């Protein structure tokens, strides 16, 4: 992306949309195989939206999550991911950011509640785009007006009015 780095206190919709539009592969660091964990829900959602999501978690290395082999670290990846999604705390995000730089990623995205300004400065100095304290799943849903709870679009909520029952007697 061209132009100066945005303020990490807020991002424009255009900026977020540009980041998500140019990304094809995402390495999700801190991936879980537990379907109720946020990292699993985000991984599944992003995969279902057409991204290739590569799980990274040293405790699960060698296993698979949703058909993708789990890697122990970013250094194990065969090719650089477009984006590294950081599901780790702010202190750990620094090391993950350094790995993302070394792996040749283009974007470092730190999840909700994760902000590490020093790591962001290192990444931006190396030419990477940085997003902090945001969730790509939530941003995609917000930008494309999807309704979802617990990580999935259920298609249960609708603006279409249900057809009224023909008669009250049939309901009893």
Image: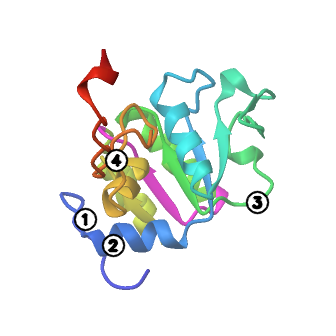
Instruction: Tell which circle, 4 or 3, labels the residue nearer the N-terminal end.
Output: 3
Above-or-below relation of 81 to 168: below
> Depth check: 32 or 158 in front?
158
Residue 23: x percent and y percent? Answer: 56, 66
Task: Name which residue lies at 48% across and 24% down.
Answer: 37
Residue 159: x percent and y percent? Answer: 27, 51
Res 126 seen here: no
* Measured Cα–Cα span from mark 4 to mark 2: 22 Å
Please rate how many residues cluster around mark 4, counting C-alpha atoms within 10 Å: few if below 14, some from 14 to 19, many from 20.
some
Number of the front mark, 4 or 3 = 4
Verify CB contact (< 8 Å) between mark 4 and mark 1. Answer: no
Q: Is residue 47 left or right of residue 163?
A: right
Task: Name which residue lies at 50% across and 71% down.
Answer: 21
**Residue position marked by numbered label 2 in the rendering:** 15
Q: Which residues are magenta?
A: 103-113
**Residue 111 part of the magenta segment:** yes
Instruction: Tell which circle, 4 or 1, labels the residue nearer the N-terminal end.
Output: 1
> Depth check: 160 or 134 in front?
160
**Tag shown at residue 147:** 4
Q: Is residue 82 left or right of residue 135?
A: right
> Depth check: 80 or 147 in front?
147
Task: Name which residue lies at 43% across and 53% down.
Answer: 109
**Residue position marked by numbered label 1 in the rendering:** 11
* Measured Cα–Cα span from mark 1 to mark 3: 28 Å
Verify CB contact (< 8 Å) between mark 1 and mark 2. Answer: yes
Residue 160: x percent and y percent? Answer: 30, 52
Number of the front mark, 4 or 2 = 4
**Tag shown at residue 79:** 3
Considering the numbered disc 2 on the image, is that residue within a helix, a strand or a loop?
A: helix
Instruction: Tell which circle, 1 or 3, labels the residue nearer the N-terminal end.
Output: 1
Q: Quadrant of residue 83?
A: bottom right
């Amino acid at each position: 992306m061209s132009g100066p780095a945005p303020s990490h206190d807020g991002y424009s919709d255009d900026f977020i949309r540009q980041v998500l539009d140019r990304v094809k592969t995402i390495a999700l660091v801190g991936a879980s195989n537990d379907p109720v964990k946020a990292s699993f829900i985000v991984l599944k959602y992003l995969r279902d939206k057409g991204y290739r999501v590569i799980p990274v978690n040293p405790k699960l290395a060698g296993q698979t999550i949703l058909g993708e082999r789990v890697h122990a670290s970013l250094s194990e990846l065969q090719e650089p991911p477009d984006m590294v999604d950081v599901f780790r705390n702010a202190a750990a995000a620094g090391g993950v950011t350094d790995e993302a730089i070394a792996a040749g990623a283009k974007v470092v995205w730190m999840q909700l509640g994760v902000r590490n300004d020093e790591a962001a400065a290192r990444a931006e100095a190396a030419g990477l785009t940085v997003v902090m304290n945001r969730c790509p799943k939530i941003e995609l849903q917000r930008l494309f007006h999807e309704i979802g709870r617990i990580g999935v679009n259920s298609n249960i909520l609708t603006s279409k009015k249900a057809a009224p029952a023909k008669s009250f007697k049939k309901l009893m």
